[in-house]
Amino acid sequence: MRNSGEGGGAGRAWAYVRSAPGTYVWLGILFVTTVALHHMSPEFEADFLRQRSTNIHELSNNPVRVLIASAMWIDGGFWWPYVVLYSVFHAQAERWLGTPRWLVVCGAAHVLATLISEGALLKAVRDGMAPASAVDTLDVGVSYALAGVVAVLTYRIASPWRCLYLACVAGVYTVPLVTGRTFTDVGHFVAVLIGLACYPLVRGRGKVRDPKETAVAPRG
């Protein structure tokens, strides 16, 4: 006889996944690409990712392709931490905003933060503050989109906790910018600002919809 508690837990988990389809489809893609990376030699992997990187060289030649492709790979090969991060932040934002608005936040943060940070790097190269080889640097990943979503969730939290959450977000992304000042630190900080600037998208959004409602909704 099946344990009803286990069945109920599995049902709730599946309902949660169904309530944020974009989040978990993206996470599934990242799983497949991460497995693929584990089957590549280190030399081939570096060259493979560089061709899908949003570095200055690739952005100059294939901007649309690399802006999309770079968000489908994780540099480093650790997938499980993203299951937690996507479930805590992306899934909550998608359930709250709806998939189209969530995608707008992700896209805006990923694209604009990439272009601004790489623009800053290009200026540094031209001013002699960064080596010329920086135009081919490896820059793939999903962290800019994640930073934007983390920031937009500020508006989901009720006062007075909203101020505390925003202070934590600001600290997490400002300290590296002040101490490290790399182009990725600039990108993360910009992505947070973009997420906060997405306030017009959150107007009129009420409670996060209950996954149970998704699971038991009658057929039309």
Image: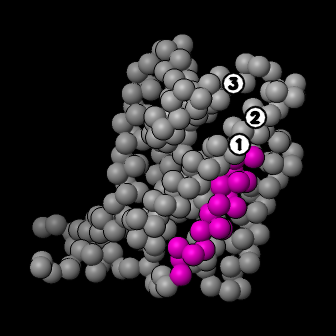
Badge 2 or badge 3: first in the primary sequence: 2
Kind of residue indicated by mark 1? Ser
Q: Is residue 133 magenta?
A: no
Query: Relative to 89, does residue 33 appear above or below in the rendering?
Result: above
* Range shown magenta: 186-203
Kind of residue indicated by mark 3? Val
Residue 31: where, in percent of width, then height?
A: 39, 40
Q: Which quadrant holds residue 171?
A: bottom right
Measured in 3D between alpha carbons, the distance from the residue under mark 3 to the one under mark 1, in whole angstroms, is 12 Å
The one nearer the camera, 134 or 155, is 134
Residue at 80% in and 55% down: 174
Query: Which residue is tagged 1?
Result: 117
Kind of residue indicated by mark 2? Leu
Measured in 3D between alpha carbons, the distance from the residue under mark 2 to the one under mark 3, in whole angstroms, is 8 Å
Q: Is residue 49 left or right of residue 136?
A: left
Helix, strand or loop under label 1: helix
Query: Which residue is tagged 2?
Result: 121
Q: Which numbered dot is residue 135?
A: 3
